[in-house]
Image (spheres, rainbow, N blue to C red):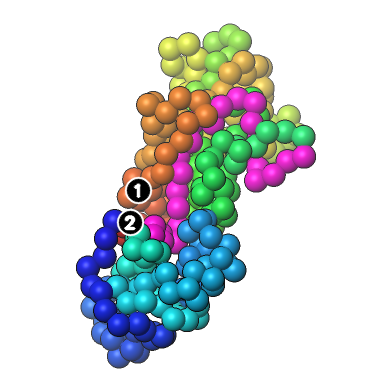
C-alpha cells in the first residue's frame, strides 16, 4: 500500500478548530484525533514502546512526512500512516465474524478451557477484541468479535431489538401450542419470563428467534416446553448471517457488512466506518 504525498518532517498539528467546525456544519464525520504512538500500538503490530522507537528512528510517516514526535495527533482514517513506507491498517474498530466451533468458550481468557481468542492469528489477538454475545461451549455458529463496545452493547441489550436466529436439533417435535407459548413469552423453570420469541419447525430441527441473551436461553426455553437440545447453532445476528463458506474455527474480518447489524438496532443509525487502507 502506498500514500500519495511525500515531503518534509512534521511535528504535531491538530486539524485547525475552524476546519473542524466547517466539517461539523457540513455533516462530515470527524474521527477523534489520537497520539501517533497510540495509533501504532492500536494496530496490534507494535507495543507502545516499540512504536515510540520506530518514531524516534524516523521510520514513521504521516501523509508522506516523517513524524518526529510520538505525541503527534492525527486521525487514523483520513491520515495515511506508514512504517518504512508500508501503509498501516489503522481502523479504530475491528469486526471479525467467526464460525465458532464446539469445544471453545467465548471469553478472552480461561484457565482451563480453550477460548475462541486462541483461534485468531497473532495481530488480531492484540487488538483488544472480545466476543460480542456468547455461545455455549457445546454450541457453534455465528460469533462476532470486536473491540467496539458500543456495538457489543447493541447486540446484547434486549432494548435494542437485534434478533438472533438459532437452529436447534431437539428430541421430539414442536406443536402449535409450543409456538404460541414462545410468542407470548415463555416462563423458564426458575420463573423468569422471556420476551416474546419466534419458534418454527425447520428441516431436522427448529428455528428460534430471540432478542435477549440470557444464560443458556435457547436450551432453557426449549426445556420449558419439554424439549432437550442435542445440537445448537447460531445462524444470524440482526441482518448478518453466518457465512457458510467459513468452516467451524474459521473467521474473517467484516467490512461495511457490519452496518447490517447497526441497521437492525432500532435506536441507532448505522455508523460510518473508518475507511480501510
Ligand atoms: N442459547 C443457549 O442455550 N446457548 C447458546 O449458546 C446461545 C443461546
Residue at 50% from the left image edge and 25% from the top image edge: 248
Write down the region rendered in magenta: 88-111
The answer to whether 107 appears left or right of 6 in the picture is: right
57 inside magenta stretch: no
Q: Which mark is residue 36?
A: none
Which circle's residue, 1 or 2, is located before the other in the chain? Answer: 1
**Residue 57: percent from the left, percent from the top?**
48, 73
The residue at 40%/64% (across/down) is 83
Q: Against 70, is 191 above or below?
A: above
Q: Left or right of 177: which side holds 266?
A: left
Whether the magenta-drawn stretch holds residue 106 is answered as yes
Can you say whether 222 is above or below 256 in the image? above
CA separation, marks 1 and 2? 8 Å
Q: Locate residue 273, reporting x and y percent.
A: 35, 59
Q: Nearer the viewer, residue 216 or 195?
A: 216
Does dot 1 land on a helix, a strand or a loop?
Answer: loop
Decide if residue 130 is on the left or right side of residue 112: left
Q: Which residue is mark 2?
A: 276
Please tell me whether mark 1 or mark 2 is closer to you in this view: 2
Residue 31: quadrant of the picture: bottom left
- The reply to whether residue 30 is in sight is no
Residue 255 image label = 1
Q: Residue 236 appears at what percent x and percent y?
A: 43, 34
Quarter of the image where the C terminus is located: bottom left
| Number of other residues with Cα within 10 Å of mark 2, as a class: few under 14, some 14 to 19, many 20 or more | few
Q: Residue at x 51, y 62 (%)?
A: 42
Q: Is residue 244 above or below residue 170?
A: below
Q: Does the residue tagged 1 have its C-beta within 8 Å of any atom of ligand 1? A: no
Q: Does residue 173 appear in this view?
A: yes
**Dot 1 crowding, Cα within 10 Å, few <14, some 14–19, many 20+:** some
Task: From the image, give the main secondary structure of the stretch colored magenta.
Answer: loop
Amino acid at each position: 500500500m502506498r500514500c500519495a504525498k511525500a515531503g518534509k518532517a512534521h511535528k504535531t498539528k491538530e486539524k485547525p478548530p475552524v476546519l473542524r467546525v466547517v466539517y461539523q456544519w457540513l455533516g462530515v464525520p470527524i474521527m477523534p484525533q489520537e497520539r501517533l504512538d497510540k495509533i501504532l500500538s492500536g494496530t496490534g503490530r507494535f507495543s507502545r514502546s516499540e512504536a515510540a522507537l520506530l518514531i524516534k528512528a524516523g521510520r514513521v510517516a504521516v501523509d508522506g512526512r516523517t513524524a518526529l514526535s510520538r505525541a503527534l495527533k492525527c486521525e487514523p482514517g483520513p491520515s495515511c500512516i506508514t512504517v518504512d513506507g508500508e501503509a498501516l491498517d489503522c481502523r479504530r474498530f475491528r469486526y471479525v465474524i467467526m464460525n465458532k466451533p464446539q469445544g471453545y468458550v467465548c471469553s478472552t481468557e480461561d484457565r482451563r478451557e480453550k477460548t475462541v481468542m486462541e483461534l485468531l492469528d497473532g495481530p488480531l489477538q492484540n487488538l483488544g477484541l472480545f466476543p460480542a454475545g456468547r455461545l455455549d461451549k457445546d454450541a457453534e455458529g455465528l460469533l462476532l468479535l470486536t473491540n467496539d463496545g458500543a456495538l457489543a452493547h447493541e447486540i446484547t441489550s434486549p432494548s435494542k431489538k437485534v434478533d438472533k436466529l438459532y437452529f436447534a436439533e431437539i428430541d421430539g417435535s414442536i406443536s402449535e401450542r409450543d409456538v404460541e407459548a414462545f410468542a407470548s413469552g415463555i416462563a423458564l423453570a426458575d420463573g423468569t419470563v422471556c420476551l416474546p420469541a419466534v419458534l418454527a419447525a425447520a428441516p431436522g430441527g427448529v428455528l428460534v428467534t430471540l432478542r435477549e441473551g440470557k444464560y443458556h436461553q435457547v436450551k432453557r426455553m426449549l426445556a420449558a416446553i419439554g424439549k432437550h437440545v442435542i445440537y445448537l447453532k447460531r445462524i444470524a445476528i440482526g441482518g448478518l448471517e453466518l457465512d457458510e463458506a467459513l468452516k467451524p474455527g474459521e473467521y474473517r474480518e467484516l467490512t461495511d457488512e457490519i452496518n447490517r447489524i447497526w441497521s437492525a438496532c432500532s435506536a441507532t443509525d448505522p455508523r460510518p466506518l473508518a475507511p480501510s487502507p
